[in-house]
Amino acid sequence: MAGKIRKLLFVDTNIWLDFYRTRSDAGLALLRDAEAVSDRIIVTYQLESEFKKNRQTAILEGMQELKAPLQIPRPGLFSDVKATEIMNRNVKQAERRVKDLKAKFIRALENPATCDPVYQACQRIFHKDDSLVLSREKKIRLTIRRKAFRRFLHGCPPRKRSDTSIGDAFNWEWIIYCAVEHNAEVVIVSRDADFGIIIDSKSYINDHLRQEFGERVSKKRRVILHNRLSEALKQFEIPISKQVEDAEKEVADVSTQSQAAALQRLGSLPSRNEYADALRALQVTDYLGALKDSQANYADMLKGLQANDYFDALKSLQVNYADIMKGLQANYYFDALKGLQVTYADMLKGLQVNYADMLKGLQSQPGRSSDSVAESPQNSPEPPSPKPPEEES
């Protein structure tokens, strides 16, 4: 009889951080269940870095949810009723407990190695000594990193549309490597859209990743995606109580709603093209024309601020402002300013004027000046794409 196919487990960063969002002891019980299969958990130093980078934020979220109940007003007609006094005593007791819990959070921030059970368990898993851990000391990391960077440049999953790092690609390449070396299937636990989608609490692995896994590992091996750790651990024959399942589902629902709200806020931000279109909508060939439309003379304003004429200042930078605006047709505003070989702040310093004071001096209607577009936080340009990482010696 053929032997049983071995399974490996990869737990994404957001799942490890969920242990700080759990509202009961069931969360720690689930963490202990995960440790029971630690010899089959795939780990990278990238995963550990992401966990430690976001750990404090997750703790802060938990602290902000700790709120003591408000004092209950005492009706004058029944002010001497014992029930009212008992309720007020319970409120004060709840306030003391909230204060004690917040103190525990603070201790966990100050000294995680001794006061944070989640951190301690994760450290044991991240630093276990086996072939499933990719540490900075292993030379294979260089090969994994090169492959990750190549798939990032090709736009292959797992990655988000707005990603500027190769973290997810790096983890995936190590997952593939471990699956090949151990001739194993892989169970992935994640709620990020990087690995697939979730419909009615069920996860579906990305088609590209499924096909790639079959081609690079084996057609007879599967890659399975779950959005809850309790469901994934059942694949390893770990008994999970209903209390633990319900506790994780509650945390997963809260986390998913929080991510959806964040994505909705990001979706409301204008894109790079919309930013350029907004500036082009001014229908002017130079900045001075836009200011004249708003009944403000820019050159006179600058002179009043003990600065040279604006165009003289720009000439000293060997650039014509109209050329900068034309550059919007190719790239966005700050790309054009890069041609000045000087940052925008430095340019304004050269004019001996404070930008905020300069805007106050406009005394123009909001929305008519192109500065009202350029200064909006929502219209800030996207960061440039990262340079290829240098090889480590």
Image (spheres, rainbow, N blue to C red):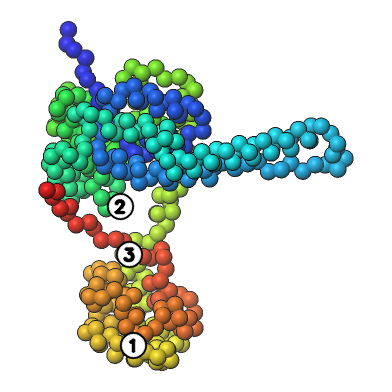
Q: Position of residue 215 (x, y in %)?
A: 14, 32
- The answer for how far apart the CA atoms under marks 2 and 3 are is 13 Å
Indicate which label's residue lies in the foreground, 2 or 1.
1
Q: Disc 1 designates what residue? A: 310
Left or right relative to 217: residue 118: right
Secondary structure category for the residue under label 2: loop
- The answer for how far apart the CA atoms under marks 3 and 1 are is 24 Å
The answer to whether marks 2 and 3 mark residues whose Cβ atoms lie closer than 8 Å is no
Q: Disc 3 designates what residue? A: 381
Q: Residue at x 37, y 85 (%)?
A: 352
Residue 175: name its quadrant.
Answer: top left
Secondary structure category for the residue under label 3: loop
Looking at the image, residue 361 lies above or below residue 86: below
Q: Disc 2 designates what residue? A: 162
The earlier-in-sequence mark between 2 and 3 is 2
Left or right relative to 125: residue 358: right
Q: Given the image, on which type of amino acid does mark 1 rest?
A: Tyr
The answer to whether marks 3 and 1 mark residues whose Cβ atoms lie closer than 8 Å is no
Asked if residue 202 shows in the view, the reply is no
- The answer for how far apart the CA atoms under marks 2 and 1 are is 37 Å
Q: Position of residue 331 (x, y in %)?
A: 25, 68
Q: Residue at x 42, y 20 (%)?
A: 240
The earlier-in-sequence mark between 3 and 1 is 1
Q: Position of residue 126 (x, y in %)?
A: 29, 34
